[in-house]
Amino acid sequence: MKENYSQLLCEIGKRFAFIEANSVEQINLCKELRHKIYCEEFKWEPETTSGLEITRHDELARHYLMFDRTEGEFIGTFRIILGADLPIGKLLGEDHILHPARINNYSSNGEVSRFSLLRKYRTPVLLPR
């Protein structure tokens, strides 16, 4: 079973790259992908004239792009928000075991959020065996 996971991860690594967005242009590409998926497609957030989906948590986040080497295109994004003021804290009561304030060293907390993947990649993709 462990070999199967290793092989799957190897195949995923051959096809897809995960890139930390280090420039303003790359971070804006993340926000464009989020806008396309969160605002235009799912209507979870209002569309903006800038074509960027932006929240107050972006400044404290590390942004990542997902790239399909086969297709030669960016296919998705996610961010990791660092610190104590995490969005999940607003969803959970302060007495919840996973509330950021209940974790001893909450300054080192992180939350993966705004995971966005283009529609054609959200359907099952069979990798070669």
Image (cartoon, rainbow, N blue to C red):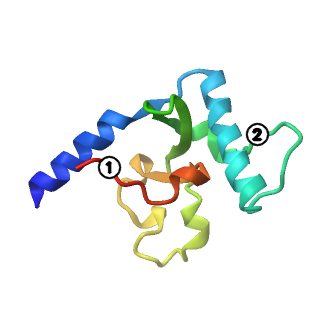
The quadrant holding residue 77 is: top right
Residue 55 appearing in the image:
no
**Position above or below: 94 against 17:** below
Q: CA distance from mark 1 to mark 2?
A: 32 Å
**Position above or below: 110 against 51:** below
Residue 118 appearing in the image:
yes
Question: Residue 111: horizontal and vertical position, in percent?
Answer: 48, 53
Q: Are marks 1 and 2 in contact (CB under 8 Å)?
A: no
| Residue 52, label in figure | 2
Q: Image point 48% across, 78% down: which residue? A: 95
Q: Image point 22% across, 50% down: which residue? A: 129
- Residue denoted by label 1: 127
In which quadrant of the rendered image does the N terminus lie? bottom left
Indicate left or right for 83 with 53 as reference. left
Question: Residue 128: horizontal and vertical position, in percent?
Answer: 28, 47
Q: Secondary structure at mark 2?
A: loop
Labels 1, 2: front one: 1
Question: Residue 114: horizontal and vertical position, in percent?
Answer: 59, 52
Say few, some or many: other residues with alpha carbon within 10 Å of mark 1 (under 14 / 14 to 19 / 20 or more): few
Badge 2 amino acid? Leu
Q: Image point 48% across, 52% down: which residue? A: 112
Question: Residue 113: horizontal and vertical position, in percent?
Answer: 54, 53
Say few, some or many: other residues with alpha carbon within 10 Å of mark 2 (under 14 / 14 to 19 / 20 or more): some
Direction right: furthest residue: 49
